[in-house]
Image (tube, rainbow, N blue to C red):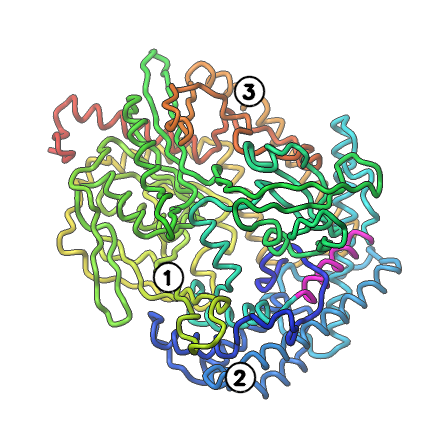
Amino acid sequence: MITPWLRSATAAIGLLAISNPACAQQADFNEVGRQMAIMLQNSHFARLPYNAELSRKFFDDYLNDLDFQKLYFTQGDIDVFNVKYADRLHTLLLQGNSIEAATEIYGVFRERVEERIADAEKLLEGDFDFTGDETVMMSRKDADWPKTDEEAKTVWANQIKEAVLAETLRQEMISKMAKEQGKDDPGADDLDPREKVALRYKRLLASVRDVDDEDVANYFLSAVARAYDPHTDYMSFREMNRFKDGMKNELVGIGALLQAEEDGATVIKGIVVGGPADKGGQLKLNDRVVAVDTLNSGSSEGMTDIMFMKIDKVVDLIRGKQGTSVALKVEPSGGAPGETKIIVIGREKVELKDEQANGELIELKDDEGKTRRIGILTLPSFYADFDQGLTRCSVDVERILVRLMDEGMDGLIFDLRNNGGGSLEEVRRMTGFFVPQGPVVQVKNTLGQKQVKESDSGKPIYTGPMVVLTDKSSASASEILAGALQDYNRAVIVGDSSTFGKGTVQQPMDIGRMLPLFAVRSKAGYLKVTIQKFYRPSGSSTQMDGVVPSIVLPSITDALDVGESELENALPHDRISPASDFRPLDAQALFLPKLQELSEERVKKSKDFTYIIEDVIKAKERLKENSVSLNRQQRERELEQADELKKERNLERLERFKKMAEVDSEQYTFYRITLDDLEKGADLQSYDPSKESGDYMRRAVDETASLDDTPKWPSGLNASKREAIHVLGDLIELTETAKLVGTLRSDGSVR
């Protein structure tokens, strides 16, 4: 399991640089911590008492962030830290002495990691007995710290043993699958399982060692901030730059997708079509980057070795100012062993088009030859360019929505699955596309003062039948939109048992502005602090509870610890009074009882939802047991049973999906609408959604993943999306019938 302190999956070789002269221009993080503590007391919504109890939360959160699985520290370490710091961190922060404590704790953590990995190296040189009845905990989150060094060594030895067994079984399963499918074994050249595990720990060790003042401050100050609530956070200068790039859906770089390999190299796994690397033509998929020359000296002396470097630091080296160049030392894919070459690529702006809003139009023909047009609008995030305002998702959504209407859509599905939120202003404007002018969201500050934010459009753009598709990953701004549309009785919400449950508003504050006049301010970082809670027009907070769909579909996330309620220090759910000018539409116009009845009938008959329900039950049982066997025969039996079940299901799916695909080909025609299409004024072009689009990025083929012979969803429509289409079809049918018989007025209300 990746611990929270390890924010990237990769590492770099180096030493803890607390007094590195090269870091002379870094901020004074003791002063940064002092100012952040003051800002938290003055700005955070909860107004927590700043006392020893809060200090212990700082303490516990920092230790858990470093050693989430309780594998490295012992109870003895914790006892020493407890006496020295547990009740004093809040005071040390205000005194400007906290980073020394954070550094001392991190130093011990590094020593323990070095000790454990030294033990791992010895263990991996020997043999393992997989015939006993030993077990390991799947999650040690709630376990006690090992009481002694001996207990810690025993826990660690079992972790290593499980890692070797899991890797052994993984390699054997891949070979078996390749043989059964008549394919080459992609793991034929894999290292011995023990060597593979050793490399993983080598990467972990490199990651733990490769920290500087900013990293240690980041780990500690982030723990301090999150003690207030899960979404209050300290963001280092580097993190803030990445956050801004993500919000505006573009960056300055070479346009390549990087992935860290276990052997330490960084591999090119994707190349953005039309990006700098693509236009240069020299960098190829699966090339291994081993060094980066940010000075573009063209010589080996100017290269920075990136073997085992954290992926975020590799990315920072490769990115830079527009118009500059970066040189990469590359081992070409398919080249001779040891062969390297230097590739120089100019940095340019790269749009992250995969993360942009996009549309789809599905033309459906029923058995009687009647045709309907279903619009699907997918929004991965509520992105916006906070600096220049050139990129706004609401503008993109509006353009796609208007095009879908121009194409004569009869109903709309707004897909907010996996949308983690973003700009509050964008969701406020966007909600006005679908409801009359009125309240979209209410916000309350720490003083209890309420503010109602309304849509800014007097008349909605689209007033037809509408479904919003959500899941457990739909959070924040997604919940504002889904909640408002549900409150207004404007749309039918369909999806997982609830959305994420994040009902708080954060504001980034530049800590550098609070530092003394002559201090280094530019690298101080930001405090992303919760300043408000938001509430639906009806007065209910989405905090903790999220948005509960009117039509709930079975989902594997029902078995997982996903959602605000599973996070430490989450703020509670509450309610305020409805917005004074909130006027919901007629709920009867959504025909919810009938839609729920029809959907329940389909779900009961659906093999796919039946499989999901079975998997949820099994997953809950496994998580409750929280135990993994170290007996090879037992693990093999478990894998065989899982493989037999998978094959049985796949045989059933193959036959059923074939029939579904035939029906789809007769009844469905798919058209895609992208922002590029709109820019070009292109006509609708039909396409096959079951085939992965390579329009925006060419990706390396994952040979191991290709062994998964689970049939693909017919027409690219999984069970949830297909059911959402059925629900919308029912809503369209019921709406049209109501209009025909005169029970539905022109304003959408029911007689």
Rendering coords of residue 51 (x, y %): 42, 84
Asked if disc 1 and disc 2 are in contact, CB closer than 8 Å, the reply is: no
Could you tell whether 617 is left or right of 551 in the image?
A: right
Residue 670 belongs to magenta span: no
Q: Main secondary structure of the magenta part?
A: helix
Real-space CA distance between mark 3 and mark 1, rounded to the nearest whole angstrom: 48 Å
Q: Nearer the viewer, residue 411 or 147?
A: 411
Number of numbered discs visible in the structure rendering = 3
Identified by mark 1, the residue type is Gln
Q: Residue furthest bottom?
A: 83
Q: Nearer the viewer, residue 192 or 344?
A: 344
Identified by mark 2, the residue type is Asn
User: In the structure shown, which secondary structural element does the residue marked by tag 3 occupy?
Assistant: helix
Q: Nearer the viewer, residue 199 or 257?
A: 257
Which residues make up the magenta segment?
195-210
Q: Which residue is label 1 attached to?
A: 506
Residue 97 numbered mark, or none: 2
The mark that comes first in sequence, 1 or 2, is 2
Real-space CA distance between mark 3 and mark 2, rounded to the nearest whole angstrom: 67 Å
Relative height, residue 436 to residue 651 (above, below):
below
Answer yes or no: is residue 634 visible: no
Rendering coords of residue 200 (x, y %): 74, 56
Mark 1 or 2: in front is: 2
Identified by mark 3, the residue type is Lys
Real-space CA distance between mark 1 and mark 2, rounded to the nearest whole angstrom: 27 Å
Q: Nearer the viewer, residue 694 or 748?
A: 694
Q: Residues within 10 Å of mark 3 (few under 14, many from 20)?
A: some
Residue 658 numbered mark, or none: 3
Rendering coords of residue 531 (x, y %): 33, 66
